[in-house]
Amino acid sequence: AALGQGAGAGDVLAAAGDAWADKAGGTSGVLWGAGLRAFGETVGNSAVPSAADLAACVTAFADRIVQLGKAEVGDKTMVDALLPFAGSLARLIGEGTDPAAAWQEAARDAAAAAAATADLLPLKGRARPLAEKSLGTPDPGATSLAMVFSVMGPHFTAVPAPQETVGAKA
């Protein structure tokens, strides 16, 4: 709805976050929603984000989720994939890696980290009561986060086409 009303990228992401939190339910819905809102607030509405801006948006997304959920790496939650993704993306962009390539590599790091949660006992979240029964199974939150980030990369890193000037002659 926000996009159809002419909202910018930041407002669209913030509205998507609010809708996600409202409709998805559960703790993960609230966390995803808050993270998307933080991403949108950081990216703003006025300009195409630079590579550094993109890294800052992902960091804001991760920071908001960690702040609200209180999970740490090793708790067998989405944070186990999120923090490796955010750290890799920031490092690679800081090193001058092309944003699309940096996003792809960070997404691979997130997928590997999500798979590694199979060896962890859950210390937070819905899976905590299952304890030993969850051994051998990757955390669904970490796995789904890695999948979403892998799929969304091209949408966040695409270089916009130059705008033609109205009335310009070829």
Image (tube, helix red, strand yellow):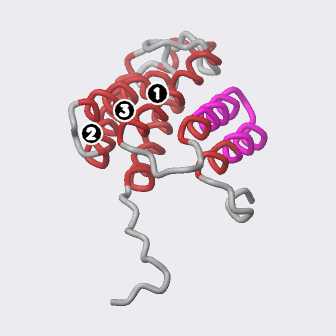
What is the distance, in whole Å, between disc 2 and disc 3 at their CAs? 9 Å
For this orientation, the residue located farthest to the bottom is 170
Residue underneath mark 3: 110
The type of residue carrying mark 3 is Ala
Q: Quadrant of residue 73?
A: top left
Assign the C terminus to one quadrant of the image.
Answer: bottom left
Q: CA distance from mark 2 to mark 1?
A: 16 Å
Q: Earlier in the sequence, mark 1 or mark 3?
A: 1
Q: Where is residue 118? Give x, y as percent.
A: 40, 23
Which marked residue is nearer to the observer: mark 2 or mark 3?
2
Which mark's residue is nearer the viewer, 2 or 1?
Answer: 1
Residue where numbered disc 1 is placed:
59
The residue segment tinted magenta is 15-38
What distance separates the C-alpha of mark 1 from that of mark 3?
14 Å
* Residue underneath mark 2: 105
* Left or right relative to 77: residue 2: right
Q: Secondary structure at mark 2?
A: helix
Q: Is residue 144 above or below residue 11?
A: above
